[in-house]
Image (tube, grey):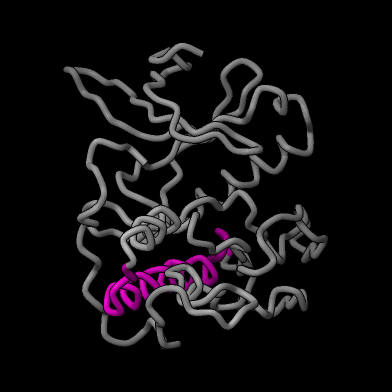
Amino acid sequence: MQLPAPFGKYELLERIATGGMAEVFLARSFGVAGFEKRLVIKRLRPELAEDPRFVSMFIAEAKIGVHLNHPNVVSVFELGKVGPAHYIAMEHLHGRDLTRIVKALRAREERVPLDRAVAIVAEVCRGLAYAHGRTDADGRPLGLVHRDVSPHNVLVTFAGEVKLVDFGIARLITTHTASGAPDRKPGPGGGKYAYIGRSRPRARTSTTAPTCSRPGSCCGSSSPGSGSTTTATTPRSSAGSARPTSPTPAPWASRSTTT
């Protein structure tokens, strides 16, 4: 595809990333009097557009995301379809994921400063606590578990915001049938085992989902499943106490890059 290119009511400007399930584009929408808004379009890959299993997972991601409105969770605006391709329109985040940040620091033989690491983990925990506590329109707990709180899915913007992204492999532990009865059939598989909370493999179905999915590993405090320390060691602490200062923009990152 040659970019920029029209895509329904949007214009695709740049391909940000390509994954096994979807392509991610920087896009923009238009309105009256020169109104313009930049956002991200996540489009199901063309070869998967007719596969019911992948379409179902993609739609489930959008339906989960639309329930979430929190400063530490990426916002989902819309689920739509252009031709055979389903897409999700979501918030555009101008920053870097933690994988790239940690790699950049390691190349300079540096570590994430302890205060920044604690601040990032605290922000991730706030986003997780919010997601885990969400209920549906009737007040029933959604029982949402992200299942992949890994460095790649934690983004720090140049403005210092910390955002949890990609609920594509999240799972609603307890859903409900049309009659309102609990339906505890397992959702689609996915996620990285090393980053799944310890209570998740036990398939706990209590009213409160696990409150942590190993976010301490995100800043490189230790490799999941090993005792090696590679960057700043972050103490285990509750995110409900005093709010740490948000991390400042990363000095090594170029502002010309959109992701």
Q: Residue 238 appears in which quarter of the rendering?
A: bottom left
Left or right of 79 on screen, residue 202: right
Regarding residue 181, the answer to whether it shows in the image is: yes
Tell me where the magenta segment starts and ends, as one range: 110-138
Examine the structure image and report whether residue 229 is included in the region drawn in magenta: no
> Does residue 251 lie above or below 82 as drawn?
below
Near-viewer residue (151 or 79)? 151
Q: Is residue 71 visible?
A: no
Left or right placement of residue 222 versus residue 219 in this view: right
Residue 216, given in percent of the width and then of the height, sits at: 48, 76
Q: Is residue 90 above or below residue 233?
A: above
- Is most of the magenta stretch helix, strand or loop? helix
Residue at left offset 71%, top offset 23%:
47
Q: Which residue is drawn at the image coordinates 57% and 60% (left, top)?
A: 136
Q: Position of residue 99 (x, y in %)?
A: 45, 56
The residue at 61%/64% (across/down) is 144
